[in-house]
Amino acid sequence: MTIQTVLAYAFGLFLLYIIGMLLVIPIKIIFKFIMNGILGALLLFIVNIIGGFVNFTIPINPVNAVVTGFLGIPGVILLIILQKIL
């Protein structure tokens, strides 16, 4: 094996590593959004069930779904504060 072959293999492994990292980072971001959306929707559902006993509900509409989907638990807290203020 010559030095050119070893360098070609090393360069190929480096490119494979870079491509792998470019594919893994968006998957982590998508997974984070999915988890935020699930946790936010579950918490919004729980708030509506418990809030039904004290006449406090947050309507589930596309705007509230987007807020809880992107922000998760802080989004539900934001919606609760906005519902109390407005």
Image (cartoon, rainbow, N blue to C red):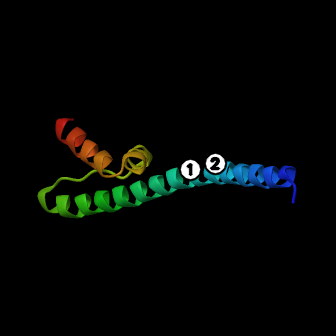
Residue 66 screen position, x and y as percent: 43, 46
Asked which quadrant contains residue 27, the reply is bottom right
Residue occupying the far front of the picture: 2
Residue 42 screen position, x and y as percent: 33, 62
Kindly state the secondary structure of the residue where label 1 is placed: helix
| Callout 1 amino acid | Ile
| Circles 1, 2 touching at the beta carbon (< 8 Å) | yes
* Other residues around mark 2 within 10 Å, as few (<14) / some (14–19) / many (≥20): few
| Callout 2 amino acid | Leu
**Front residue of this view, candidates 61 and 22:** 22
The number of discs equals 2
According to the picture, the residue beneath numbered tag 2 turns out to be 22
Identify the residue shown where x is 51% and y is 50%.
29
Residue 8 lies left or right of residue 63; in this view the side is right
Residue 53 lies left or right of residue 39; in this view the side is left
Residue occupying the far top of the picture: 86
Residue occupying the far left of the picture: 54
Dot label at residue 17: none
**Front residue of this view, candidates 45 and 19:** 19
According to the picture, the residue beneath numbered tag 1 turns out to be 25
Residue 25 lies left or right of residue 43; in this view the side is right
Kindly state the secondary structure of the residue where label 2 is placed: helix
Q: CA distance from mark 1 to mark 2?
A: 6 Å
* Other residues around mark 1 within 10 Å, as few (<14) / some (14–19) / many (≥20): few
Identify the residue shown where x is 18% and y is 58%.
51
Identify the residue shown where x is 49% and y is 57%.
31
**Front residue of this view, candidates 30 and 66:** 30
Asked which quadrant contains residue 85, the reply is top left
Residue 13 lies left or right of residue 58; in this view the side is right
